[in-house]
Image: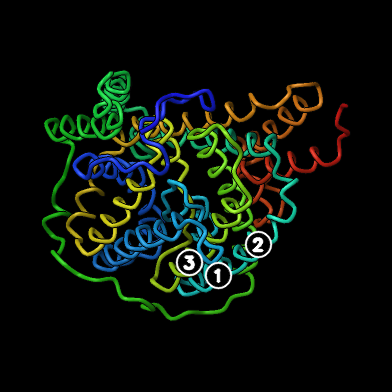
Amino acid sequence: MINKSESTEIEVIYGIHDKPKLSLGIPLAIQHILAMFVANITVPLLVSSLLGLSSAETTFLIQCAILMAGVTTFIQVMRYRFGIGSGLPIVMGTSNAFIPVVVVIATDYGIGAVLVASFIGGLFEIILGRYLIHVKRIFTPLVAGIVVLTIGITLIPVGIRQAAGGSSNMGDLTSLAIAGLVLLTIIIFNQSKNKVLKSSSILIGIGVGYVVSILLGLVDITPVIESSWLSFPQPFQYQWTFEPVAIIAMLFMYIATAIESVGDISAITNGAEGREATKKELRGGVVADGISSSIAALFNAFPNTSYSQNIGVVNLTGVFSVFVIKIGAVILILLSLLPKFAAFITIMPQPVLGGAAVAMFAMVAVSGVSLLKKIKLDSRNILIIAVALGLGIGFNVVPEATQQLPENVQLILTTGLVPAALVAILLDLLLPKKQ
C-alpha cells in the first residue's frame, strides 16, 4: 500500500502491484464495471436500433460486448508478455470513438462489414504499436499531456448530457437533481479519512442515485423480467463481408485509438508513480489494443480500446491496483453469461451515470494538466498547447465547420483527439526548441 509521495500529487491508496483483500477488491472492481458498462454497450445498442434488430439479437450483441471487455482487459493488464500488454490498471471495452464509423458502415453494408473492418483495423494497430515505439520522440510529455487533456475535455459533454437526462429528456430538472446528488455523494465520500469509503466513492454515489431513481419510479424492470437467465455468446454469428471503403474509414479511427491509448497509459503512470510511461508499456498497450479489437471481431463485438473514464476512476479513488482490474475482468466474463444482469445495468437511468461521469471525465482532464505541469511553459510550448487544443476541441464542439469536407475527413477532424494530437506532434517536431 502506498501513500502520497513526492513523485505524484495523487494520494495513492493502492499501488499498481498492491493486492487489497478480496472483500475490498470486489466492490472496487464493481465500481469500475459500473463506470464503463453503459459506454461498453452503447455501440451495440445504437447499431441494433438503427438496423431494427430483435430484442434477443440486441441482448446477444450486448453479451458479446461484455464478454470481450473482460477478455481484452486481461490482455491489456498482461505485463508485456510476448510484446503484449501494458501491465497497468487499464480497463478495456467497446470504443465509443468508433460510433460514427460503425453506424455508417453497419447501415450501408451490415454488421458483417463492420466486423471485417474491425478485424483488419486491429491488425493495423498491432503494426502501428510496434512501429510507433521506434519514434517515441514524437510522443513527448508535451504531446501526451495535450492528448490526455483533450480526451478529458471532449468527454465531459458526454457526462453532462447524461446528467441532464439524455437527448430525449434534455434539461429535465429531476435528472439534474439526481446527477447532482450522485456527484455530491462522490465528493463527500472521496474526502473521507476511511480508505474503504474513499476508494469506493464512485460506487457509493452510483448506488445512492440508483436507489433514489427506483424510489421515484424512474426504473422500468420489464427488460430484466423478459431476459433469460443463462446463455453463452457464440463466435462468427454474422456473415463477414469485405468492403474496402469500410476498411479505409476504420483504419483512420484506429490511429486515433492508438493515440488515445498512449494518452491513457501516460495518465496512469503519471498518476500512480509520477513518471513517464516506458517503451514497453506504450508498445505493449497499443499492441494489446489492436489484438483486443481483432479478437472482439471474432466474437461479434465492435472495436475495443482503453477506457478513459476508468482512468478517471483510478485517479479519483487512488486505487491503481492491477489486481482490482483483474477481478473486474473476471466479473465481466461471468456476467456476460447472465443476460438478466446486462438488462439490470441497462435500465439504470442516465443521470445516475452522468453524475459519476462528470467527475471521472474531469479527472482525466486534470491528469492532462498534471502532465503539462512538468513541461517548461515557455512561449513555444504554450503556443503548441493553445493551437492544438483550439483546433481539436474547436472542431469537436463545432462539427458543422467541416461539413463541406469528405465524410471520412469529417469523422477524423470532429473526434477532437486526432486533430489535437496531430497538430501537437507536427508543431513539436517543426518549431525550434529554445536552448
Quadrant in which the N terminus is drawn: top left
Q: In screen coordinates, is 141 left or right of 338?
A: right
Q: CA separation, marks 2 and 3?
A: 30 Å
Most foreground residue, 359 or 392:
359
Q: In which quarter of the view is residue 402 placed?
A: top right
The label number, if any, that marks residue 130 in the structure image: 2
- Alpha-carbon neighbours of circle 2 within 10 Å: few (<14), some, or many (≥20)? some
Judge whether 206 appears above or below 185 on screen: below
Which comes before the other along the chain, label 2 or label 3? 3
The label number, if any, that marks residue 47 in the structure image: none
Q: Which residue is mark 3?
A: 106
Which comes before the other along the chain, label 3 or label 1? 3
Q: Amino acid at mark 3?
A: Ala
Most foreground residue, 190 or 347:
190
Q: Amino acid at mark 2?
A: Arg
Element type at mark 3: helix
Q: CA separation, marks 3 and 1?
A: 11 Å
Q: In screen coordinates, is 318 left or right of 337?
A: right
Judge whether 200 appears above or below 229 on screen: above
